[in-house]
Image: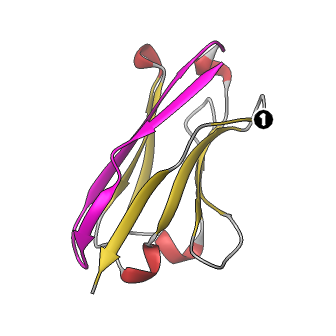
Amino acid sequence: VQLQASGGGLVQAGGSLRLSCITSGTIFSRNTMGWYRQAPGKQREVVATIRSGGETYYVDSVKGRFTISRTNAKNTVYLQMNNLKPEDTGVYSCRDLTNNYWGQGTQVTVSS
């Protein structure tokens, strides 16, 4: 099983980034997928999740700015991040919640 995240980078406050996570080795369409982040000196937190049926969840701090989506035909989950803030800085990881697999992280840095 592999989860490969990409799309992180350095962006100014107010900017946008799109993260992608390609998975293999599971029946992706059946899985609940999520994005998590860990800021320096803080515990990892869930940012957003999406169920197999498309139902989504967002942590309050990103509602209205981030959008999680999935393309089952590509075994990929996305996180569109708009109006980024410095407090969004951290390592973002994707997770297969159904099978409890984690991908490697991708760094997101938002400068003020």
Instruction: Give the residue displayed 60% in from the left and 37% down from the top.
Output: 103
Q: Quadrant of residue 31?
A: top right
Check disc 1 and report its element: helix, strand or loop. Answer: loop
**From what the image shows, is residue 90 above or below residue 102?**
below
The amino acid beneath tag 1 is: Asn
2 is within the stretch colored magenta: yes
Question: Would residue 16 be found to the left or right of residue 63 on screen?
Answer: left
Q: Nearer the viewer, residue 70 or 91?
A: 91
**From what the image shows, is residue 89 above or below residue 79?**
below
Instruction: Give the residue displayed 30% in from the left and 57% down from the top.
Output: 9
How packed mark 1 is, by other alpha carbons closer than 10 Å (few <14, some 14-19, many 20 or more), is few
Percent from the top left, x then y, of residue 107? 43, 57
Furthest-bottom residue in view?
112
* Residue at the spot of label 1: 100
Q: Is residue 36 in view?
A: yes
Question: Would residue 8 be found to the left or right of residue 50 on screen?
Answer: left
**From what the image shows, is residue 86 above or below residue 54?**
below
Q: Nearer the viewer, residue 87 or 29?
A: 87
Percent from the top left, x then y, of residue 95? 64, 40
Q: Quadrant of residue 14?
A: bottom left
Percent from the top left, x then y, of residue 71? 42, 26
Percent from the top left, x then y, of residue 22? 46, 27
Instruction: Give the residue displayed 44% in from the left and 40% down from the top.
Output: 69
Quadrant of the image containing the C terminus: bottom left
19 is within the stretch colored magenta: yes
Span shown in magenta: 1-26
Q: Is residue 50 in view?
A: no
Q: Which of 31 and 90 is in front in this view?
A: 90
Q: Is the magenta stretch mostly helix, strand or loop?
A: strand
